[in-house]
Image (tube, rainbow, N blue to C red):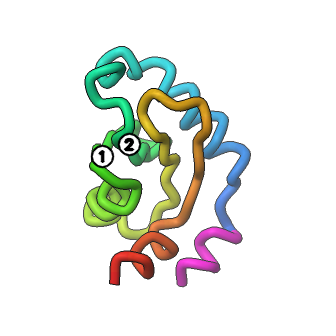
Amino acid sequence: MGQDLLKQADIQKIAAEGSQIYQEIKDKYEPQDNGKFLAINIETKDIYPGSTSAEAVEKATAAHPDKVFYVVKIGFESVETMAHAIIRSEIK
């Protein structure tokens, strides 16, 4: 299911919109939370923080099990977009 979800997702749209949302909220998290992660649902703009990307996505997945999230490392320029199923397999 996770791979199908990822194939159906518009990764460029998620990356562009997720980046825009992060730019709007980053002052709430930087610099005190630098190095932690946020999973962002671009449709609802819900934010899920975590100490690791897996933790952030696990929280996001609990609320939105069939979504792909924009994941950002707070305070860093590099960002990633990933499907929850990929992260969940790393947790187990």
In screen coordinates, is 26 left or right of 14? left
Q: Are marks 2 and 1 in contact (CB under 8 Å)?
A: yes
Question: Which residue is drawn at the image coordinates 61% and 45% (left, top)?
Answer: 14
User: How many C-alpha atoms fall within 10 Å of the one at disc 1: few (<14), some, or many (≥20)?
Assistant: many
Q: In the image, which residues are magenta? A: 1-7
Picture coordinates of residue 52 (x, y %)? 34, 54
Look at the magenta stretch and give its main secondary structure: helix
Residue at which label 2 appears? 38
Q: Tally the marks.
A: 2
Q: Residue furthest front?
A: 35
Front residue of this view, candidates 29 and 45: 29
Q: Amino acid at mark 1?
A: Tyr
Query: Which one is earlier in the sequence, the residue at label 2 or at label 1?
Result: 2
The reply to whether the magenta stretch includes residue 14 is: no
Q: Quadrant of the N terminus?
A: bottom right
Residue 24 in the image: above or below residue 90: above
Picture coordinates of residue 92 (x, y %)? 34, 84
| Local secondary structure at mark 2 | strand
Which corner quadrant of the image does residue 20 belong to? top right
| Local secondary structure at mark 1 | strand
